[in-house]
Image: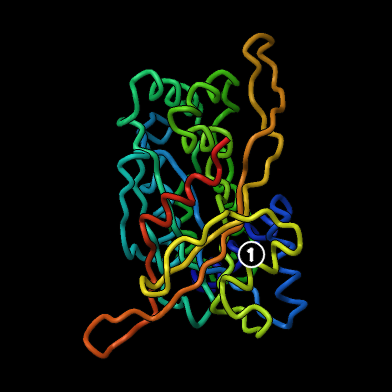
Amino acid sequence: MNPSQIALKLWNKLWKNYIYRVNYAQIYQQMIVTAGGTVANDHIAFRSLRLNVDTSQGTKNLGIDYLGKIAEALGYHAASEYTFPDQKLYARHYQHPEQDALDLPKLFISELIVEQLPDAIAQLIYQTVNSVKLADVETLVERIKLADTELEAEQLTEELQLIYTRPWNAPFKSVVETVNPVSQYGAWVLLHGYAVNHFTGYINRQNTPLYPDIETTVKGLTDRSVPMKAEIEGDLKSGLRQTATQAVQEGVTVIDDTSKQEVSIPWTYAYYEIAERALVEVTPGEKVLFQGFKGANAQQLFEMTRK
């Protein structure tokens, strides 16, 4: 049982949970399958915080340093990095050497650079996540390397999927409302932790003449009453075009400041993205399929979860 097979199991479990919460992805899946096409994911996006906290396992960083170790244990490698100064964000995308052979999605992992926020906001974030209980990543990495049976792989997958939840206590309502105007990304992470931010339908793999490109796919979703982003980001000359549904809203748990009890309030969760890739010239006369991401595109898509 190699790491790539565990990765496939893990992403499949996260996908099932995600489409339960994001019904727009279910509509897309049904639309493509009904048309005789294939549903494949171009990439999965995760959010995090670049912030050091003291835990029972010592000082840990809650950002890419944490999530990246799992990605690498599953056979992924860092391919490119991206900076978003206005939003105080940094991101890295990971690819798998068996990406094409096994239909393994790329991973887009971003982090909020908390120390660049105003001190008062950074303190609110730190005080909220200080209750964090992280998985023992080092032990999990070793177990991934040694797993050689289906049962071990299943047990590992069950444990790994728990990483992609919120590993700290529910935030106070006032904290979320104070952080949100400064960093909607930060407020989102306080509420949802490492939950999947979005999956991405891969236009190039749809394999159906009814939806040959991103425009026809958007129209198909719009015709099915799926609310879509107004614009398509990027162009084929750049190698990547992207758009997304609007983010779904769901009830999230926060602590009421007066009663100190858990209450539910509506907040944005996730959207479903679709992406179309194209050939780009790398040397005169030589073209390859663009595999990276475009910072300007991503910057616009980050805003899809604004409350």
Q: Toward the viewer: 300 or 87? A: 300
Observer-nearest of 46 and 304: 304
Residue 138 seen in render: no
Q: Residues within 10 Å of mark 1 (few under 14, many from 20)?
A: few
Whether residue 37 sits left or right of residue 239 in the image: it is right
Amino acid at the residue labelled 1: Asn
The location of residue 219, given as percent across then percent down, is 66, 67
Where residue 99 appears, as percent x and y from the top left, is 47, 76
Identify which residue is drawn at 71% across, 27% down.
264
Q: Residue furthest top?
A: 258
Residue 164 position (above or below residue 54)? below
Residue at 48% x, 54% y is 140
Q: Position of residue 211 (x, y in %)?
A: 64, 78
Residue at 54% of width from left, 78% of height from top?
204
Judging by the rendered image, the residue that carries numbered circle 1 is 12
Q: Is residue 42 left or right of residue 281?
A: right
* Visual colour scheme: rainbow
Residue 286 seen from this side: yes
Q: Is residue 37 left or right of residue 174?
A: right
Residue 110 drawn at (x, y percent): 41, 49
Please tell me which residue is depicted at 44% across the width and 57% down the height of the picture. 108
Seen as rendered, the residue at the extreme bottom is 285
